[in-house]
Amino acid sequence: MKTMNGLKAALGVAIAAASLSAWPQDGASAGASAGAAVSASGGMTAKGARQADRALRHKVYASLAKHKEIDAGNISITAKGGAVTINGTVPDASQIDTVAEVAKGVVGVTSVTNKLTLQRPLGQ
């Protein structure tokens, strides 16, 4: 009986030791992958990246609002990691290049993709 209790205790200790040694491996790999994800994104989490993109988008909108000659009512802006894409329509062809130049001048913008088109009059 004492031998059986000793075997059970030894088996319990062995299982506990095996599970404890497995714990740091899982935690270490999860921590390493999370660290790799953060370092791959330039030290920014996904939430932080979305906030930075949103802030950049607002900066571009604010910069366009300062230019009274630009009709930005039909313009949408997306930003991702400093790359800005401008979509929509403008009433005057000269505004297409002006909008792109204004966006390029905003701090934090690394590239601009201009997909603006000329607004067509109704019925055409």
Image (cartoon, helix red, strand yellow):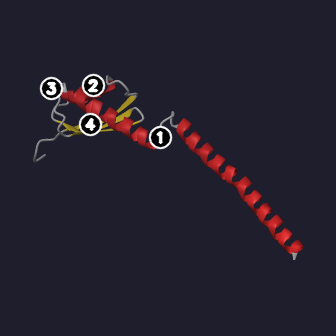
The image quarter in which residue 94 lies: top left
Mark 4 vs mark 1: give the one in front: 1
Element under disc 4: strand
Please, what is the three-letter code of the amino acid marked with disc 2? Val
> Residue 107 vs residue 63: left or right?
right
Mark 3 or mark 2: whose residue is earlier in sequence: 3
Identified at 56% across, 44% down, the residue is 34
Disc 1 marks which amino acid?
Thr
Residue at left offset 68%, top offset 54%: 23
Q: Earlier in the sequence, mark 3 or mark 1?
A: 1
Q: Residues within 10 Å of mark 1 (few under 14, many from 20)?
A: some
**Amino acid type for the residue under numbered disc 3:** Glu
Q: CA distance from mark 4 to mark 1?
A: 31 Å
Disc 2 crowd rating (10 Å Cα; few below 14, some 14-19, many 20+) is some
* Mark 3 → mark 2, Cα distance in angstroms: 12 Å
Residue for badge 1: 45
**C-beta proximity under 8 Å, tags 3 and 2:** no
Image spot of residue 83 (x, y percent): 39, 33
- Extreme residue toward the bottom, this view: 1
- Looking at the rendered image, the disc whose residue lies closer to the viewer, 4 or 3, is 3
Tag 4 residue? 116
Tell me the distance, in whole angstroms, between the alpha carbons under discs 4 and 3. Answer: 16 Å
Which is closer to the viewer, label 2 or label 4?
2
Count neighbours of disc 4 (C-alpha within 10 A) and say few if under 14, some if 14 to 19, many if 20 or more: many
User: Which residue was labeled with disc 3?
Assistant: 69
Q: Nearer the viewer, mark 2 or mark 1?
A: 1
Pick whichever of labels 2 and 1 is earlier in the sequence.
1
Question: Mark 4 or mark 3: which comes first in sequence?
Answer: 3
Q: Could you tell me which secondary element the residue under label 1 belongs to?
A: loop
Give the Cα separation between the discs numbered 2 and 4.
14 Å
Quadrant in the picture for residue 85: top left
Mark 3 and mark 1: span between their CA atoms?
A: 38 Å
